[in-house]
């Protein structure tokens, strides 16, 4: 776990302790770790929902690719 969530790779796969992707397990939005650095702050309105929207779309693309 990273600050604020589960560590993911570039395809939004959750990764294990060795940073290897866990097939079929995806994480998106604020559930992903490392999104806000050392503390959870949202100094700019919309940052949190922006992560959710963009990473949700990317996660959906990865799931579609996984399902074939």
Image: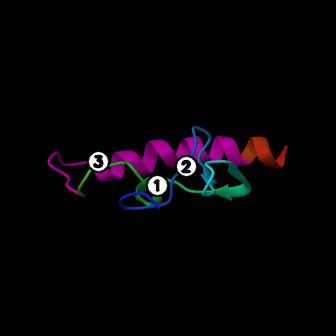
Choose mark 1 or mark 3, whichever is in front. 3
- From mark 2 to mark 3, how far is it between C-alphas? 15 Å
Q: Quadrant of the C terminus?
A: top right
Residue placed at 63% from the left, 47% from the top? 60
Q: Is residue 28 magenta?
A: no
Answer above or below: position of 2 versus 8: below
Count how many numbered circles sit on residues in the image. 3
Work out whether mark 2 precedes mark 3 in sequence or the reverse, and give the earlier one. 2
Marks 2 and 1: in contact by CB < 8 Å? yes
Mark sitting earlier along the chain (1/2): 2
Crowd tier of the residue under label 2, counting other residues whose Cα lies within 10 Å: few below 14, some 14–19, many 20 or above = many
Q: Are marks 2 and 3 in contact (CB under 8 Å)?
A: no
Q: Main secondary structure of the magenta part?
A: helix
Residue bearing mark 1: 32
Q: Are marks 1 and 3 in contact (CB under 8 Å)?
A: no
**Which tag, 1 or 3, sits closer to the chain's start?**
1
Please indicate whether residue 22 sits to the left or right of residue 59 in the image.
right
For label 1, count other residues whose C-alpha is less than 10 Å away and answer few (under 14), some (14-19) or many (20+).
many
Name the residue tied to disc 3: 37
- Residue range in magenta is 40-63
The residue beneath circle 2 is 8
Figure colour scheme:
rainbow
| Image coordinates for residue 42, horizontal then vertical, percent | 20, 52
Q: Going 46% across and 55% down the picture, which residue do you hit? A: 32
Q: Secondary structure at mark 1?
A: loop
């Amino acid at each position: 776990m990273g600050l604020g969530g589960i560590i993911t790779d570039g395809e939004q796969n959750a990764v294990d302790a060795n940073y290897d992707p866990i097939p079929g397990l995806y994480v998106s939005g604020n559930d992903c770790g490392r999104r806000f650095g050392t503390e959870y702050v949202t100094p700019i309105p919309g940052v949190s929902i922006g992560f959710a929207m963009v990473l949700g779309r990317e996660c959906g693309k990865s799931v579609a690719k996984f399902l074939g």
